[in-house]
């Protein structure tokens, strides 16, 4: 049986009100009495009832994370960065998977409001009007991680996806590739992926190489990388590929291998994100690296500042991406 | 501003006590009044204060998950299985990363107790006396996922790691391998990994092939797979390898490739766990598959039964493993 505040009061030979004053750090208790209460708390391993205290302070020391799918290899590292930072400040993490279903995303804001979380990290593919309304209605500080809010209404952390994609495609062009395929995400409301697509289009267009038949859009899964490259190569010659994510790039390379086409000897392939797998896959994947762990920790730091009403320098953090050259291009 | 219980009472033209009775499903309110209250709740989008209710019911509808590291590719799928099941029963998930640090594991039980979680899923590498004491002291239902409690004091979900490893090594022997290395975990308190090691030793011993120089133990990381195979091949011929986890197996294959040694042509390699990567890596990895998603969901189902004091058939669930033959052995 856990010790109660009564037990502590009895042990320290003071009133319950005095124990309460010590717990709430109200400075009217003399030092000697205070020490006696603290000793009693330690001796009895008394844990003040956090829920009761939350009710009073309206704070739960809990932060909600709304996430598409923790088993998608992109998110665990972001969540780990967020959790490490949160635990430094004594916050705990509550997780809601949404599978990018907009209704589940909105419901998650409601659930987290009911749980009285102090703040929310939002990860989803679009900050559309509905989501912004849900954020506003929640009345809770929210930071978007991964998807930037170009209107700067929701504080956000991300990278310059457009430039990352453009640089990668320009690199393929510099290697002599002319028939460069884009295999990416098909949801047009997904802001960051539209930027990747725009970076691809501009780089190709600038070089006079744009060809709509080299474009395939599907969901962001391994299988769609396979489907995409198989579809495009039915009618097109391909010497380079940029993908919306690393999983798709690995699908592309495996599908090409099945056909006896070698990467990078015959085709150059570039991914996006730099998930853990990219560095250990064979061939090691050239990719546009998002600083996943940092995105989580910087996002959480910003959120905790907002929760505590501390001044923030800016609410729109574009972290540097890194174009990582490995073995899938030559 | 969110609606309060007062607003609902006013809107429905009833007393606060009546609203409270409807919310707590106490059946003394007549149907017509009840409906009026429910309509008012819907109209005002009133969310009862869960914390206040938790305090009364001593339930938070939250389940804690204690986990070594969410960014380790083993755990996201288990957590996803657990969360999917929890959300069916309207529970939310609170996450604590411990990095297998025993002090942080014990502290996590305290934190989760303070947060008044209704139950805890524990993932760690040993159910030692300290952890069992922490579980007992918490006074909260706990289910161990991944690590079985052979003493059956803590309800647990896992696989028969010993038989899985033994079957895999016997398979290597059946392929004609004689110099089969074991590259696994070095923490002797890690129960499941000791079973894998025992399975290896027994299979080798039965075939008269046991050789201590073929054993390397380190942490469960990719880099240790590389270090392990490099160390062993300094002095030994190797024709087969079984690893304590898939990441190590991939390290082994990459290290062998660096030396110009081909898998599976020259050396057969088997992993353990069947993380997502195993099926897409090249060569596709032969491995002992643990049913990760199912371990999470079955563990959560068991925990929710315990929380609700429902009868359970058994508290020790050994789910079937699957020996998955892919392309890293021939």
Image (cartoon, coloured by chain):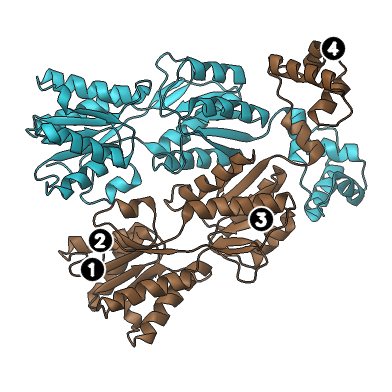
Chain colours: A cyan, B brown
Chain containing mark 3:
B
Quadrant (top left, top right, bottom left, bottom right) of the C terminus of chain B: bottom left
Q: Which residue is mark 2?
A: B327
Distance from the alpha carbon under mark 3 to that under mark 1: 43 Å
Q: Which residue is mark 3?
A: B142
Identify which residue is drawn at 47% across, 54% down: B292
Task: State if disc 1 and disc 2 touch (CB < 8 Å).
Answer: yes
Task: Give the label on residue A137, or none.
Answer: none
Q: Are marks 3 and 2 on the same chain?
A: yes
Chain containing mark 4:
B
Nearer mark to the viewer, of 3 and 2: 2
Mark 4: secondary structure: loop
Tell me if A72 is positioned left or right of A9 in this view: left
Distance from the alpha carbon under mark 2 to that under mark 4: 71 Å
Distance from the alpha carbon under mark 3 to that under mark 2: 39 Å
Distance from the alpha carbon under mark 1 to that under mark 4: 77 Å
Task: State if disc 1 and disc 3 touch (CB < 8 Å).
Answer: no
Q: Which residue is mark 1?
A: B330
Residue B69 appearing in the image: no
Vertically, is A173 above or below B329? above
Tell me if B74 is positioned left or right of B47 in this view: left
Q: Nearer the viewer, residue A97 or A173?
A: A97
- Counting other residues with Cα less than 10 Å from the Cα at mark 4, is it few (<14), some (14-19), or many (20 or more)? some
Of callouts 1 and 4, which one flags the residue occurring earlier in the amino acid sequence? 4
- Counting other residues with Cα less than 10 Å from the Cα at mark 1, is it few (<14), some (14-19), or many (20 or more)? some
Identify which residue is drawn at 34% across, 51% down: B277
Q: Nearer the viewer, residue B319 or A321?
A: B319
Point out the residue furthest to the bottom here. B208
- Counting other residues with Cα less than 10 Å from the Cα at mark 3, is it few (<14), some (14-19), or many (20 or more)? many
Q: Which residue is mark 4?
A: B13
Q: Quadrant of residue B202?
A: bottom left
């Amino acid at each position: 049986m856990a010790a109660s505040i009564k037990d502590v009061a009895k042990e320290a030979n003071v009133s319950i009100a005095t124990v309460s004053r010590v717990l709430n750090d109200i400075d009217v208790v003399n030092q000697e009495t205070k020490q006696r209460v603290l000793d009693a708390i330690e001796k009895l391993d008394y844990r003040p009832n956090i829920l009761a205290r939350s009710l009073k302070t309206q704070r739960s020391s809990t932060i909600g994370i709304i996430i598409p799918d923790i088993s998608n290899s992109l998110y665990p590292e972001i969540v780990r960065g967020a959790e490490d930072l949160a635990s430094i400040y004594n916050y705990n993490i509550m997780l809601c998977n949404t599978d990018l279903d907009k209704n589940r995303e909105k419901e998650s804001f409601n659930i987290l409001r009911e749980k009285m979380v102090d703040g929310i990290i939002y990860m989803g593919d679009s900050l559309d009007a509905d989501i912004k309304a849900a954020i506003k209605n929640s009345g809770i500080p929210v930071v978007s991680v991964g998807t930037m809010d170009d209107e700067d209404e929701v504080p956000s952390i991300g990278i310059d996806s457009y430039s990352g994609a453009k640089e990668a495609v320009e690199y393929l062009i510099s290697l002599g590739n002319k028939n460069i395929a884009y295999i990416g995400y098909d949801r047009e409301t997904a802001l960051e992926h539209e930027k990747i697509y725009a970076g691809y289009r501009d780089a190709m267009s600038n070089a006079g190489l744009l060809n709509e038949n080299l474009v395939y859009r599907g969901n962001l899964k391994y299988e769609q990388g396979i489907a995409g490259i198989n579809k495009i190569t039915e009618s097109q010659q391909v010497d380079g590929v940029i993908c919306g994510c690393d999983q798709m790039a690995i699908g592309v390379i495996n599908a090409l291998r099945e056909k006896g086409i070698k990467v990078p000897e015959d085709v150059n392939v570039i991914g996006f994100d730099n998930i853990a797998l990219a560095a250990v896959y064979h061939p090691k994947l050239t990719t546009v690296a998002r600083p996943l762990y940092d995105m989580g920790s910087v996002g959480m730091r910003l959120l905790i500042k907002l929760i505590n009403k501390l001044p923030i320098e800016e609410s729109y953090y574009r972290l540097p991406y890194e174009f990582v050259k490995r073995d899938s291009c030559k």
